[in-house]
Amino acid sequence: MRILEKILGRRPHWGVHPDDHKRPAADAPLRSLPLPEVLHVPLQQHVGNPARPVVLVGERVLKGDLIAEPNGNISAPVHAPTSGWISAIGEITAAHPSGLSQLAITITADGADAWCERVPVADPFALAPEEISRRTAAAGVVGLGGATFPAAVKFNLGRRLQVGTLIVNGGECEPYLSSDDRMMRDRAAEVVDGLRIVMHAIGAREALIGIEDNKPQAIAAMRVAAAAFGNVQLRVVPARYPMGSDKQLIQTLTGKEVPADARAAEVGVLVHNVSTCAAVHRAVRRGEPLVERIVTLNGGALTRPGNVLAPIGTPVVDLLRFAGVSERPARLVLGGPMMGIVLPHARVPIVKGASGILAFDAAEARTPPAGPCIRCGSCTRACPMGLLPLEMASRIGVGDLDSAAGLGLSDCIGCGCCAYVCPAHIPLVQFFSHAKGELSARERSRLRNDATRRLAEDRAARLAREAQEKAAANARRKAERDAAKAAVGGGSRLLSTRIADTTSEAAT
């Protein structure tokens, strides 16, 4: 049946279908994490500039209080995830394989978990779209599917480009993860209300909810929640990685292809994740900033995998302790196994974009040794962007990065499909990440050199202009002096003439 659907064009021919490993975590009831004693809230939880602290050490805060304000147009505020005291503002280890540090605000919880004053809205649809954006921005809502782009900035973009269709991403194609699945099962009404608020904010005529067919309970719950709204349609899409990627979901649901270097809004579509829609509902309808999220805890090293509702800033070690650890994890991953980030240790905190924490045992973390490319073409067939991974890797391997860029390296979304299907186990994604980083560094260097050259040219032009102005001034002053001398000389001659005339008259 699937082969027939593929021939008829109903199933995507790109991507891979890895074992999802979503169960039993996906089917376990959602749990709330006991309030941690200490929370480390990073200031960089979104794309764009890090937020700027507005609190001092020793200050008392309530849950939802603003503790860091946005810093620029592409930025988002940060709020206290619980009540307590600001015990430190300093550097902690970032959730990145490098183990580099980042600035964070540490809150020692008082255990009361007391909210600040909230301003709910009974009818969000009576608000102006600009007010929806303002409230969403003030609540610090960012894309919770992993992109962490400030949601309100997307709203403004959607209005400016007159987007007609909102696509709600319920794909969650990464193996092991099920936080969006649980969100749709347990809070379907919040998701649907949030997506309708987003539609109002951007002026969209319709909304399409895309959910993979391996989430039957979520499909049923969302279908019931959306039944009353004729302009909200639910579409079941094939479970195929990376169906959760924006461009692939847009093409599957609408048939529209987003051109390279273009944004989805430019083809009349805007994409938001289901958890982002629920966060918009809470921000606008209840006046609650984004201070917690559902996190999937999964992996062979855990004894009680599942999904938990956890405050932002919770140390990973607290989550692992709650889930139970049967053995020392061989690898800790923030996010999914295909596109997630390997954590340096368990003392880093979760952030707004943390959809899951995976604790892999030795078998799951094992990486086969890489061999030579046999040019089978599997990576090319799997690439969802229609690229030639083997050719790009070959050229990167000999240092010809410009040639690799010419083959569309910048269009690579880093999904890892090519590496997953490679029978030689070549780490293709690492090749591409390295090349992108190197090209990005070159571009930054070129921009710096251009800026330096422009400064030098501007300085030379300024010096030349100043020299010219100085010469002109000197010439003007010389002319004035000459004129003055001439005037003085003429006066002397006239006086001498008058004296001579007077002497002559006296003699006469």
Image (tube, rainbow, N blue to C red):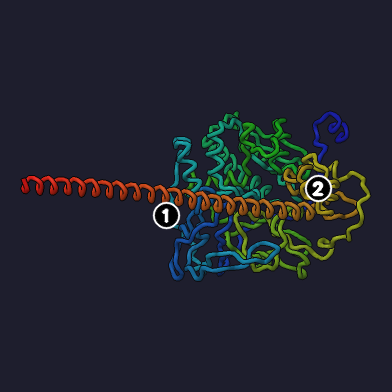
Q: Nearer the viewer, residue 57 or 37?
A: 57
Sequence-wise first label, 2 or 1: 1
Where's residue 112, x and y in %? 48, 65
Q: Nearer the viewer, residue 302 or 468?
A: 468
Cβ atoms at labels 2 and 1 below 8 Å apart: no
Between circles 2 and 1, the one closer to the viewer is 2
Q: Is residue 296 above or below residue 402?
A: below
Disc 2, SS: helix
| Residue in the image at 5% along x and 48% along y | 506
Q: Nearer the viewer, residue 421 or 213?
A: 421
- The residue positioned farthest toward the front in the image shown: 508
Q: Nearer the viewer, residue 301 or 366?
A: 366
- The residue under label 1 is 117
Q: Quadrant of the C terminus?
A: top left
Q: Is residue 314 left or right of residue 439?
A: left
Residue 23 visible (yes or no): no
- Disc 2 crowd rating (10 Å Cα; few below 14, some 14-19, many 20+) is many
Where's residue 66, x and y in %? 46, 57
Q: Is residue 95 above or below residue 256?
A: below
The disc placed on residue 417 is 2
Where's residue 166, x and y in %? 61, 35
Q: Is residue 424 left or right of residue 176?
A: right
Dividing the picture into quadrants, the one containing residue 278 is top right
Q: CA distance from mark 2 to mark 1?
A: 47 Å
- Badge 1 amino acid: Glu
- Badge 2 amino acid: Cys
Disc 1, SS: loop
- Disc 1 crowd rating (10 Å Cα; few below 14, some 14-19, many 20+) is few
